[in-house]
Image: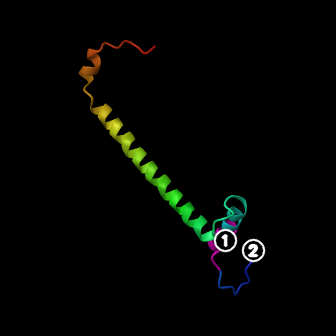
Amino acid sequence: MISPANSLNLNPIETIWTELEYQLQKQIVPGLTARQIRITFEQTILFLLIIIILSSKLWLTIFYTWRAYPQHQINHYDIKSMP
């Protein structure tokens, strides 16, 4: 979509959003409005970010718990090698 030089719509991101919403509305969710598609997309991104943050926190908790585990307790089990 080409806008004239004196157009009020000078933000290319809005043009991209409009085209993306149109394509999604045609192909994936014909019953949803462009606004509903955008809200659903933004909520999905937020949900994914929350999952990433919680996963990172869990991984760090496991890492630091393992790191703090006393070496002498590991040695007590006399583990020679892994199969």
Relative to 57, does residue 79 appear above or below in the rendering? above
In front: 44, or 73? 44
The residue identified by callout 1 is: 18
The residue identified by callout 2 is: 1
| Mark 2 residue type | Met
Residue at image location 29% in from the left, 20% down from the top: 74
Where is residue 26, by image quadrant? bottom right
Label 1 vs label 2: CA separation? 10 Å
Q: Is residue 56 magenta?
A: no
Residue at image location 69% in from the left, 63% down from the top: 30
Where is residue 39, by image quadrant? bottom right
Whole-percent x, y for residue 20 in the image: 67, 65
Judge the density around disc 2: few (<14), some (14-19), many (≥20) Cα neighbours within 10 Å: few
Residue at image location 51% in from the left, 60% down from the top: 43
The residue positioned farthest toward the front in the image shown:
31
Whole-percent x, y for residue 41 in the image: 57, 61
